[in-house]
Image (cartoon, grey):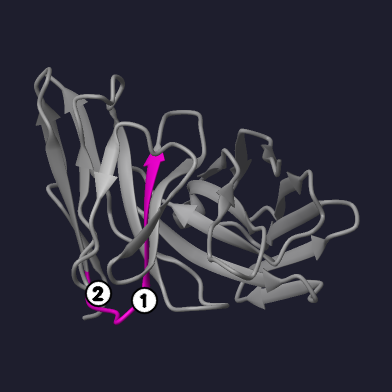
Amino acid sequence: DGGITQSPKYLFRKEGQNVTLSCEQNLNHDAMYWYRQDPGQGLRLIYYSQIVNDFQKGDIAEGYSVSREKKESFPLTVTSAQKNPTAFYLCASSGQFNQPQHFGDGTRLSIL
Amino acid sequence: KQEVTQIPAALSVPEGENLVLNCSFTDSAIYNLQWFRQDPGKGLTSLLLIQSSQREQTSGRLNASLDKSSGRSTLYIAASQPGDSATYLCAVRPDGATNKLIFGTGTLLAVQP
């Protein structure tokens, strides 16, 4: 079945620790995206990548980093510089142009 | 800067009722608009996508309309069912160069049996 897999479903971070959220897709999509969702707010774009080995900052990139070494993978690292990381993180992918974005089931990150 | 607003934030209706969810955006220069559904603790499922040149799209009991000049879109749900209970989000794509989306804050819908 084609889709997007995010892991883990739940993640806990200690103070000063970097954590990495995984996102894998088997839809053969060129573009991938990371969003953050907080209660009462819409999704906000962290980073996006339109092709392998290229990515762009979104609206709230500070404290986050990404890589795009393979077409199917777009991991997100939440660094210790991100002072308020508790949120629901969603990964998405899309083909080019007018294709809608497909979403994974999310990772919920909390602080210990 | 494009801003997307959804009103109401929450809505409760009895089963079988027809209902309308609203989405407004501040900049009428959009490429397309998309409606999503989100179940609790889950990702988003795309419901309908309307291109900027279109006025409406339909899928089953769902009908989405777009009025670019007034910066508004509506999602009409006919004969609502308890299974329709979810958060509904609209998102605009500002331009055709990238597939970046700007999301509204969503409307939480509860359909009472």
Above or below A82: residue B50? below
The reply to whether the magenta stretch includes residue B43 is: no
Mark number displayed over residue A30: 1
Closer to the camera in the image, A29 or B35? A29
User: Which amino acid type is shown beneath numbered disc 1?
Assistant: Asp
Q: Secondary structure at mark 2?
A: loop
Residue tagged 2: A71
Q: Position of residue B61 (x, y in %)?
A: 62, 70
Q: Position of residue A70 (x, y in %)?
A: 19, 72
Chain of the residue under label 1: A
**Magenta range:** A25-36
Q: Are marks 2 and 1 in contact (CB under 8 Å)?
A: yes
Residue furthest front as drawn: A53
Q: Is residue A87 visible?
A: yes
Above or below A61: residue B99? below
Rate crowding at label 2 as few (under 14), some (14 to 19) or many (20 or more) other CA atoms within 10 Å. Answer: many
Label 2 vs 1, first from the N-terminus:
1
Q: Secondary structure at mark 1?
A: loop
Q: Is residue A62 left or right of residue B53?
A: left
Residue furthest right as drawn: B69
The reply to whether the magenta stretch includes residue A30 is: yes
Above or below B79: residue B89? above
- Alpha-carbon distance for marks 2 and 1? 7 Å
Q: Position of residue B107 (x, y in %)?
A: 59, 41
User: Which amino acid type is shown beneath numbered disc 2?
Assistant: Lys
Residue name at image x 79 percent, y 76 percent: B54
Chain of the residue under label 2: A
